[in-house]
Image (tube, coloured by chain):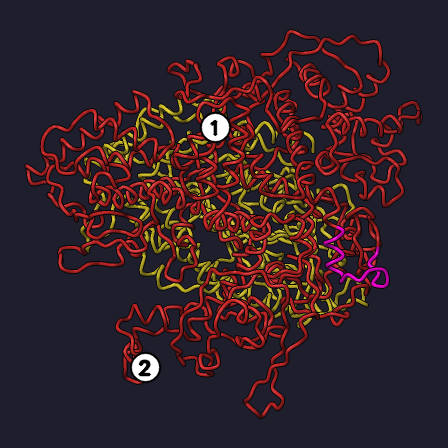
Amino acid sequence: MTRKFLAVLLLSAVGVGCTGEFSLDGMGPDTRTDQGTQPDSGVDMGADVSVPDLGGDAGGDAGWTQCETPEAVFQSKTWPEAGRMVCAGCHLAGGVAQNQGSTFLLKGEQSITSEGLTLDEFYAYNLGQFREHSDDVGGVPKFVSKALGVDHGGGAVAPMNSDAYQSLEALVTAFETEGSTECVEPPDIDPLADLLLMTPQETLRKATLQMAGRLPTQAELDQLEGLEEAEAMQALDGILMSVMQGQNFHEWLKYTWNEIFRFRGLWELDVTFDFMVVPQQDFGTRTWGFIGRNNLLCDTLWENEPVWDRFGYASIAECDNNLFGRDYMGDRVAWSLIEGPLELVAHIIESDRPFTEILTTETVMMNYYSSIVYFGSAKANNNPYVAQYMSEVDMDTVEHPAGSTLQSVTIPELHEFRPMNSMKRSRRFRPDPQVNEIFYEYHAAAEWPRAGLLTDQLYLTRYPTTDTNVNRHRTWAFFNQFLGVDILALADRRGDPAEAELGSDQPVIDDPNCNVCHNVMDPVAGLFQDFGIEARWLPNAQWPPRDQPPMLGPGISIIGPNPGAAYDPTQTNLAPLQWLGAQTIQDPRFASRMIRHAFLQVTGHEPMEPPTDLDSAGWRGRVKAYEVETQFINALRMGFVDNNYDMKWVYREIVKSPWYRAKNIATPEVIESPDRLAGISNFGEQDKLLTPFEMHRKIEAVLGRPWAKRAYAMRGNNLNVIDENAVENDFLLRFNSENDFRFIDSIYRDMYGGIDHFNNTSRLTLPSSVMAAVGRRVASEFACATVAQDFALQPRNRVFFGAVQADSSTDLNPTANRQTLIRLHERMLGVTPDEAQITAALALFDQVRTQGQTAIAEGRAVADLPPHCQALEIENGQQGAFTAISQDPTYSVRAWMAVVAYVAMDPEFIYRW
Amino acid sequence: MKIQRRSFMKAASLAGLSLLTPVTYESVASAEDQENFQGFDGPYFIMINLIGGWDVTRFCDPKGLEHSIDPSKGPINWGFSETEIINVGTGAQPIRVAPVDQYGEFFNDYRDRVTIINGVDCGTNGHNQGERVTWSGTLDRGWPSIAALIAAEKSKPLEIPVPFLTFGGYDKTGDLIVPTRLQNMSAFTKVTAPGVARFDGDTPITFHDDFAESAIRQAAQGRLAAARMNATLPRTSKGLDALFTARLTEDYIGRVMDYFDPAAFDALGNGRLDQLRKQAMLSLTTFEAGVAVSANMAFRGWDTHNNNIDNTTGRYTELFTLLREIRQMAEARGLGDKLHIFVGSDFGRTPYENATAGKDHWAVGSWMHVSATPGGGRGVFGATDAQMRGMRLKSDLTTVAHDDMSGEKVTPGLLHNDLRRLAGIAESEFAAAYPLEGDLGAPIFT
């Protein structure tokens, strides 16, 4: 098939029958839902399981004729070859060309979501620009002569032998023959009808695991039983509302918004004092302590006495829970400050407040530790948090220049964040340099106008600036995170940056290659100018004046309903960043960007980029996939606005959509058609490993109790010594839980493709060999910590092994084993195993058990369970009588450990929520 | 430009296939396979990403106090005169560098391996774009870094577990290969021996007895193969194939420990130079074990908008200390003549200081190559003119004015084409899928 013909195949795929409407009430009449049967595509893959060839000739869906209308040629050829690739580099609205007076202005694909355009409207607008600039210039249309460099500010951009030029030529031909071509429409592609979706119950399990870190209850599942698809989705919606509650949902919100804003990356800044994450000049009341000395001093000597004894505690543990000092404070204060903005985002969502408040609210989320920074005092008379929510802690005694004074108090709760609507800056100073006494000056609470994240200390610290950057970096981050505008992409290819610098004293203002970005960026940077390096508050232009050349005057550049407006304090009582926030939330790109964040958070995938590859087969399908996905995102955006920016509504709609629920193809014919196969290429999830956080939460959910902070195990041959730190020392899968911060241990995180949100911000989503080894180890750790511990309970209280016995020395009951295997699969994977899977698992069990018994008999194995895997004491979350298990003479426990590890290595377990 | 882009999309399709097609779904690595393991024998590549944009006038493209692109902006170099510029190369192949006490013994020991290319025009002064073009050869998005490209091509016939190591910087792979990050080695034995809960001295305390562990793995691979047979969504197929492939080569990770010195590694701290030493040590360890092809090192701290001289001198001192130690470590491991090192950055820095004694972004910078071949250094090619513009390079490797079209603009793409030739992948399938503009017709790197 020729390229030309291929291009033509595309025409009706995007141009015909697109209404731009997407109903959130249903996914189309043909969307299939697997009603609980075993996933079976009905596709006989045979012995050859190689992936269908997506490359090469684009055959497969012929049978209809080419249709070279201007619309078809433009969509299939001119736009991707010339419009997007060449012209849009300068001719997007606000770009270099407009700066130079051009009236040939195009829209980029971003406008589809930001302006709510349909694909038809998008292409029609841009084609219209070509039509309007097709007047004859020297025998060719103007857009052709310009491309060849005739009277063109950008020079020759499409030489005559280039693909871009040929695509322009094709458009000229199409214009000339317009109206004379009869078109036969190709068969329609409906990607949504080609998908097999998860059942409502499977969907609920996935969402509950993902967002609430638990399995759905039987009562929740029962509500979906036997319902038709539409009814089931309605019921699911209601259940999800209750799922989106509680501490685990709260933790997920913070986790998933940190993936966007990356506040936790601040820990990589070599933070050694708490005040390093907020400016000491603004919050200089106290330096509360070192970071990293959070174990306090209970187990050390102080003035020759054990600290815990000196303070009258009965044990080190009791001391740990009650003794409070500066060294204990450092970590907690820094953690509380860094978590603050994530707490704010979570609070807005959980309390059903409009999500626009992330840019407008005056609320600051505080716990005790951050409150003493934000109010400059731990005293109730100065600290409303302390006054309102807790009894005063005598921090004056705690604070001590030597840093070792301890105070016996009840340690304030770390996770108790409250919305506070005031804060005070304070200044620390020495009135006389010779006097070693420090005074504090408190400022009035109203001094600091706030606008959600924009004025958040941690946001400004995470996205810093310098004297010469003058807030442009913050502006770049702001545009990207809140509007989806990549300022750097406005001029991915500049003419010659060095030449630009040489040609002007102020190239950022004078040179089109520079000001294409700076015109957008600098006015907004000016609005940030109340904040300087280290996020210091420097109002009234103490630090480079906001309009000092080469900076442009403060304004909103391309943002909001009045783009280009300048900030005028005589016309508004809002502070600059409050005004920016108010303008931003009125910009449709704000809602669009938030929807795209949400889509990524829930599905694990970024929304599709417009397909551009004309050479490979299935392009038509990819266009269709893009079209339906874009319609869905547009519908979400409009619904988001209509629902008063309710982010939980967005999450629920995505969960109910095929982009979350697709699990297989609906019919075998799909893979016979390159177009149809390409149409479903953006569905499914198993090309993204669960992240370390997600895996940890899933394991706890499946386990039904918290992962042990400390598994009790016998160390080596000394059976009299309990090693309380077996997990801490030996397992990869662990929380860094000593300080209760609920972070995944960094070693596991690093080894499993994780990111630190600062130096590494791109996750590894497919497994390397190292990650595969980590996965195998974690599967074994899970089996080790689970099996004997479960058998140690009475059968009715067991999670997995209620149907079988740990110590059976005779042949096991095949029915019970089968029941147990089904239970394991359903609990761990959320699927009922098919006969082949049961047979394979039983075979593994029998093989290991038989070999194990032989090995014991021959002295090659011992009756003892591996030390880490013995069940010696009841764990947090377990219930009922507990019978310790340290031996396994029949090798049954270890055979079950093998089966559990095997199931935990299943791709369903490691890829799917 | 369009041809490149089209080819990229082709390669995107290739990307899936590259992960998928080698998979046979027949077996895991047998003991015999492990016995007959065929590692990669070099040459190896380390790409040192100097993140932020380096001031090459403080190293290999010095101008001196007398020179300025505009008198109102001040000199290009404070602190030294043009007459003080020193030669750290040879008489035949001079390498003129800034007279700053920052080179240590590096050039004394390795001047015969060094090639400098000055006047490299990145065509951008944005960080993201600069990193991208320097290490992929193009401003287009989504292209693989050169380290990933070499690793993908060279590892194709082999079953090596960590062909492409990355410690940060521009490390996109174009989906040609799965990268590996090794950051925290304190627990690496937990990965090289995933079945061992703890070593009691030399005695492993395992989760499962050996026969059980083996049975679990065989059964898991069989289960994975069955899942793949039923998978029809392309994403699912891709994920399952990647998992299967990773498990297939997982056994060979343990080879790293045969060449790893944990005591030396643990003795290093967390400062910048020690972190870089760790990156180098891990790279060379995996090279020696035959399980890796290339490594991307990330060296931060070059974005010297403030106090340029002090900051830059500190970074260069660390860089040359590091380069010498890498060479020494490589030689000690018998890899001295198999290791190519390339040093590059986002771009250069302005030929004048700003108000805070810093320097801002400048599109023209330099590259440095430390050859695997003794005597492989070729001195300096390319240059900048008095305005700090990149001069063009002719096929005889002489320079002409920046607007003399008889020469080629020295772009990262042009250098990448030569680097690909050096690596022996210029004609390869993957390289063909990502063609680059710029061809000098004469080799630079040897």
Residue B334, percent across and down?
A: 36, 50
- Residue at point 34%, 38% (across, down): B250
Quarter of the image where one finds residue A220:
top left
Residue B332 appears left or right of A20: left
- The residue positioned 66% from the left and 23% from the top of the image is A614
Does residue B437 appear in the picture of this structure? yes
Q: Chain of mark 1?
A: A
Is residue B290 at least partly visible in the picture? no
Of tags 2 and 1, which is closer to the observer? Answer: 1
Label 2 or label 1, whichever comes before in sequence order: 1
Instruction: State the yellow chain.
Output: B
Q: Nearer the viewer, residue B410 or A186?
A: A186
Q: Mark 1: which amino acid?
A: Pro
Kindly identify which numbered label has been placed on residue B355. none
The quadrant of the picture occupied by the C terminus of chain A is top left
Q: Where residue A409 appears, x then y in whole percent?
A: 40, 74
Residue furthest bottom as drawn? A434
Q: How far across and down, in percent of the image, does residue B113 sit?
A: 50, 53
Name the residue tied to disc 2.
A302
Residues tagged 2 and 1 counted as in contact (Cβ below 8 A) = no
| CA–CA distance in space, label 2 to label 1 | 61 Å
Q: Amino acid at mark 2?
A: Trp
Q: Which residue is mark 1?
A: A200
Nearer-the-camera pick, A667 or A44: A667
On the picture, is B79 further left or further right than B114?
right
Residue B180 lies left or right of residue A645; in this view the side is left
Q: Which residues are magenta?
A: A566-583
Looking at the image, is A15 positioned above or below residue B101? above
Colour red, chain? A
Residue A659 coordinates in the image, percent (x, y): 55, 30
Give the SS element for disc 2.
strand
